[in-house]
Amino acid sequence: MEQNTIQQMPRAVSDAMQRNAHAFWEQQAKVLDNMQVFANGWFERRHAGIKAALEASERLCSASTPIECLGEYQKWMGGVFERLTADGLACQHELRTVTEGLGPSLVPLLTKEQNDAVPTSTKSRVRAEA
């Protein structure tokens, strides 16, 4: 009879484990969605960078003066720094999202009331076996 009592998981523990599993996998899905948004944004910025570099090289090749050439180069470099800044901000956002997901999103196994409802003899047996 004692063996059977120990093998049965209290309903409150089972419910808490189910909530924790659900919360964990929801958070994993959220992290994956955010990573996809980050990756898509990164690729969009790379495509924009290639297009900007192509256009800048065409303008540089057709520049009639060194000053005009330098101006085109400065415009292109401004876009480079804008894209790098956007990459950094997107990376910070992604890191924040991931770390929030690793935080205390899990539900406590038992509330104080539920813990108090577990017989002391059961708690002692479980501690002794652990």
Image (cartoon, helix red, strand yellow):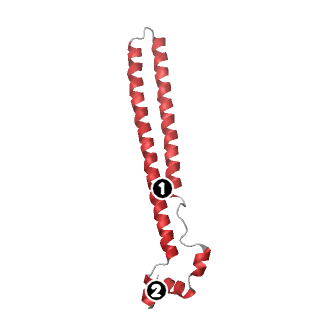
Q: Quadrant of residue 116?
A: bottom right
Which quarter of the rendered picture does the N terminus lie within?
Answer: bottom left
Q: Secondary structure at mark 2?
A: helix
- Determine crowd level at label 1: few under 14, some 14-19, many 20+ residues with C-alpha closer than 10 A: some
Q: Nearer the viewer, mark 1 or mark 2?
A: 2
Front residue of 116/92: it is 116
Residue 21 percent location from the top left of the image = 46, 64
| Residue at (49% x, 60% y) in the render | 23
From the image, tell me which residue sits under label 2.
5
Q: Assess whether mark 2 and mark 1 are in contact (beta carbons under 8 angstroms).
A: no
Q: Secondary structure at mark 1?
A: helix
Residue 98 percent location from the top left of the image = 49, 52
Residue 5, placed above or below residue 70:
below
| Residue at (42% x, 24% y) in the render | 52
Residue 83 percent location from the top left of the image = 48, 32
Tell me the amino acid under the disc marked 2.
Thr
Residue 114 percent location from the top left of the image = 58, 76
Residue 60, placed above or below residue 102:
above
Front residue of 60/107: it is 107
Front residue of 111/126: it is 111
Counting labels gives 2
| Residue at (48% x, 34% y) in the render | 84
Residue reaching furthest to the bottom? 1
Residue 107, placed above or below residue 129:
above
Front residue of 112/98: it is 112
Comes first in the chain, label 1 or label 2: 2
| Residue at (50% x, 76% y) in the render | 11
- Determine crowd level at label 2: few under 14, some 14-19, many 20+ residues with C-alpha closer than 10 A: few
Q: Which mark is residue 27?
A: 1
Tell me the amino acid under the disc marked 1.
Gln
